Amino acid sequence: MTTTLAIPLALVAAYLVGSIDFAVVVARMHGVDIHEVGSGNPGASNVLRTLGKVPAAMVFLGDMLKGVVAAAMGMIASGVADPQVHWAFAAGLAAVLGHCYPVFHKFKGGKGVATAGGLLLFTLPLVAIIDVALWALMARLTKTASVSSLVVMAVTVPLALWQGIGSTALMWLLLTIALIVWRHKANIKRMVRGDEQKVTT
């Protein structure tokens, strides 16, 4: 298969992988519709808030794996054996898009933070490790998942530049971060009002 054909197929496949919503799956395993409890967001934080640590860990790992798989597909499709090839970041964006607007769940998805973390774990592992540690620290200090996620998004670009990310890859990463911030718009409004939901950590 030529690279010209392989890349769009990889992007579509990455979107479909991203559309698998582990929060919905895990919650259903516990007899719960995740859209009807807590904040209603189908993500790891809401699962943690409503179902506990073990289900939330399952969701987090599943969502992160989506980003890893997508980025790997982008790299393989590019024909370049380099995790930082820009098509890996493009495929990661496709997976995050799938997570946020999943075709399998009526386009009602989560925020994409963990899936973006998987993208970084494959392409920029040190950045991913720092981001996860920072998220955990901020969650413990603020008890607010959205604050933690937005802080992590703010530091990811400087960290990626520190790790030598290429210009085209940076463009895809910036679009990924912009999408995640956009998905947090309701959280930001609640922060301004002072009534954003807390999360147990």
Image (cartoon, grey):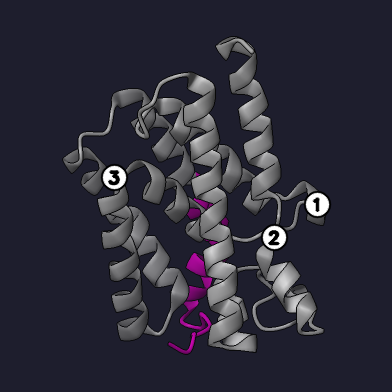
Which mark is nearer the camera, 3 or 2?
2
Across and down, in percent, residue 88 comes to 46, 33
Distance of label 1 from label 3 (alpha carbons): 31 Å
- What residue do we see at 58% from left, 62% from top? 62
Identify the image quadrant of the C terminus.
bottom left
Instruction: Tell me where residue 130 sits by quadrant.
Output: bottom left
Mark 3: which amino acid? Answer: Val
Where is 126 relative to 188, above or below? Answer: above
Which is nearer the eye, 81 or 22? 81
Across and down, in percent, residue 157 comes to 29, 45
Asked whether the residues under the numbered discs 1 and 3 touch, taking CB atoms below 8 Å apart as contact, a structural biologist would say no
Q: Which residue is mark 1?
A: 104
Mark 1: which amino acid? Answer: Phe
Q: Earlier in the sequence, mark 1 or mark 3?
A: 1
Q: Residues within 10 Å of mark 1 (few under 14, many from 20)?
A: some
SS class of the residue under badge 3? helix
Asked whether the residues under the numbered discs 2 and 1 touch, taking CB atoms below 8 Å apart as contact, a structural biologist would say yes
Read off the magenta span. Answer: 179-201
Mark 2: which amino acid? Answer: Asp
Distance of label 3 from label 2 (alpha carbons): 26 Å
Q: Which residue is mark 2?
A: 21
Q: Is residue 192 magenta?
A: yes
Instruction: Tell me where residue 4 sits by quadrant.
Output: top right
Distance of label 2 from label 1 (alpha carbons): 8 Å
> Which residue is the extreme one toward the left?
162
Which mark is nearer the camera, 1 or 3?
1
Q: Earlier in the sequence, mark 2 or mark 1?
A: 2
Across and down, in percent, residue 158 comes to 22, 46
- What residue do we see at 45% from left, 46% from top? 119
Taking 170 as reference, is 117 left or right? Answer: right
Identify the image quadrant of the N terminus.
top right
